[in-house]
Image: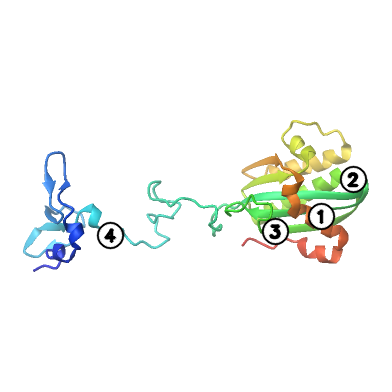
Amino acid sequence: MHPLRGLHQLLPLDLVERGLRRAGRHRQRPPLHLRLARRGGRGTAGDPGRPRRRLAVPDHLQLHRCLPAGDQHHGGHPGGLPGHRGASRLSEPTGPGTPLRLVIRTDGAARGNPGAASCGAVLIDASRRDALDPDAPPLVAIAKALGRRTNNVAEYAGLIMALRAARRLGAVAIDLRLDSRLIVEQLNGRWRVRDAKIARLYEEARRLLVGFESWHATHEPRARNRAADRLANLALDDPHEAARYVEAVGRA
């Protein structure tokens, strides 16, 4: 006996006893049935006794194909059909070839206004499940002492350093989460830029933003910006330790 013709004897009894399935509008087929081979098609395994026939196992008993991850029909492949693609999860790390999207938090500090100033920033892979968590681990951390500056200049300096780091990483989209309402409102065009020093920094920030496919800026409470705030204070309290955070640590 051909091995596939005896397949029904090997199937668990509860599967075989599922009964007949609909095939078309008015007829039924048994769980294991014969069908004519399609011209030019690979079809299923042949019956050596009847060359023009093929053995077909019902859909609900067939195994899903095991495809390599690089195959375009694999469930997780971005080029697959929408019905076959796996759901995108925020916890999945950004892989090679995947457009990088970042959540960016920045802060500026000045002890005195003007006074000893610094800035801090964290750049977080937006594909992380905890990307919006205030304590999410960053791809890049920045802490920089700025000398004597005003608080608003320090805030803009932190933003510009973070945008430059994002450009170096090749990010295509950024989500700015800032506790500086001044910067958020000015970037969104709702507040005017009146100070000449701020105007230059504003123009530089806008120039950098043009290099991304998309961006948006949202104001958040200072408590949610604590990672960038700690880095800004570190730059003032321990400049030698802060020097480790000036350069981007690279894409994970």
Which is in the foreground here, disc 2 or disc 1? 1
Residue in the image at 59% along x and 53% along y: 100
Q: Residues within 10 Å of mark 1 (few under 14, many from 20)?
A: many
Q: Which residue is mark 4?
A: 63
Q: What is the CA distance from the residue labelled 2 to the residue labelled 1?
A: 14 Å
* Residue type at the position of mark 3: Val
Front-most of 74 and 151? Answer: 151
| Front position among marks 3 and 1 | 1
**Amino acid marked by disc 1:** Ala
Q: Which residue is mark 3?
A: 140
Residue at 54%, 54% in the rendered image: 98
Residue type at mark 2 is: Thr
**Cβ–Cβ below 8 Å for labels 2 and 3?**
no
Percent coordinates x, y for residue 36 in the rendering: 12, 53
* Residue 39, position as x, y percentages in the image: 16, 52
CA gap, disc 3 and disc 1: 14 Å
Query: Helix, strand or loop at disc 1?
Result: helix
Residue at image position (82%, 66%) is 241
Looking at the rendered image, the disc whose residue lies closer to the viewer, 3 or 4, is: 4
Residue of label 1: 232
Quadrant location of the C terminus in the rendered image: bottom right
- How far apart marks 3 and 4 lie (CA) works out to 44 Å
Give the CA distance from mark 2 to mark 3: 25 Å
Do the residues under discs 2 and 1 have CB atoms within 8 angstroms?
no
Q: Secondary structure at mark 2?
A: loop
Q: The disc labelled 4 sits on which kind of residue?
A: Leu
Which disc number belongs to residue 97? none
Under circle 3, the secondary element is strand
Of callouts 3 and 4, the N-terminal one = 4
